[in-house]
Image (cartoon, rainbow, N blue to C red):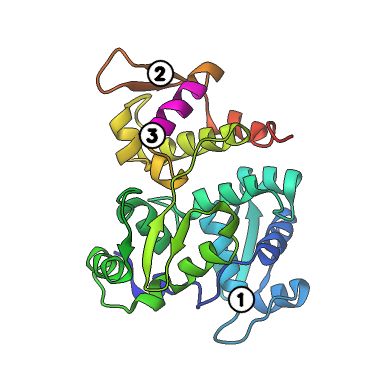
Amino acid sequence: MVNRSQLKFHETFQPETGYIAKIIEQSSRGYRGSKFEVSVETGMPTGNQKGKVEPHIKYAGYMGLINYSVERGIYNLSLTNLGKEIYNQDKYLHEPLSKWLCHYGITQKHTGAPQWAFLFNEEHIGFARDISSERIIEQANRFFGLNLPFEEIFGVVRRCYIDGIFSDLEMLSVDDVGKWKFEEKYERDELLYVYAYALLDGWDKSLAEKSEITLLELIDNLGFGKIFGFNDSSISEVLEMFNDEGIIILNRQLFPATLIRTSSVEEIIPQLYSRLL
């Protein structure tokens, strides 16, 4: 069960690319220190009660970029394998590809930030119609077992997709009366290994005991299409690309179609940026 403090981890601060990059850099050195020491080194403001240091450490963790622990106010930071690749290839997070990876991480059903994961996995009902803010908060409060105002849970989510770190991805739009719309996207060749990473990483987290899954499990358990804005046709096209690249074996002779994994996350990570021009 998620509590109120877990939903308010961001302290109303949306993720900022520059600050995430500074946390990645510190983590690359195996940084150890208090939030005040992090603040002095990075320039991120912090105080005794609130500040941007702790939310950005948590953002980087939810995005899958760092591992961290905290004991008696002292943080221990290190990079994940994904974080190492991003640091080596795009340490300042300038590439949209890097932001797609961060978006994938923070929206993960089991390991992402709670409200991001809820919005893209539970509340995403397709591309055909808008969703009101009232419906979103009603469903969220039911899902989390709480009674919180919309802005407290989703204000930061909205801002980071409308005019913040993820705005260039054009995943969400919100009109003047609070109607939300999930935008439909098409597969992009340069993101092939991002999609492959998401498939295999999600598979490891949700269905690790299985070497073969169905198309329905891919969509329902991994939330694969929703996270990238894919319709059924785009999902099919990406799976064919995976099959051609030897990432999976796709068997369409069965119904529903099945996927057999022939690659690992560790094999995909070094290829993430390989298709950029």
Q: Which residues are magenta?
A: 232-242
Where is residue 166? Give x, y as percent: 57, 58
Which quadrant of the structure image shows residue 213? Answer: top left
Residue 16 in view: yes
Secondary element type, mark 3: loop
Q: Amino acid at mark 3?
A: Ala
Q: Amino acid at mark 1?
A: Lys
Please report whichever mark, 1 or 2, sits nearer to the chain's N-terminal start.
1
From the viewer's perspective, tell me whether residue 85 is left or right of residue 192: right
Which quadrant of the structure image shows residue 27? Answer: bottom right
Residue at 30% from the left image edge and 70% from the top image edge = 137
Q: Check contact, mark 1 vs mark 2: CB within 8 A.
A: no
The residues bearing labels 2 and 3 have C-alpha atoms spaced at a distance of: 18 Å
Please report whichever mark, 2 or 3, sits nearer to the chain's N-terminal start.
3
Q: Amino acid at mark 2?
A: Leu
Residue beneath disc 2? 250
Q: Nearer the viewer, residue 230 or 144?
A: 230
Q: Tell me: residue 113, above or below residue 236.
A: below
Image depth: mark 2 or mark 3 in front: 2
Q: Nearer the viewer, residue 66 or 95?
A: 95
Where is residue 174? Give x, y as percent: 43, 65
* Residue 52 disc label: 1
* Residue 208 disc label: 3
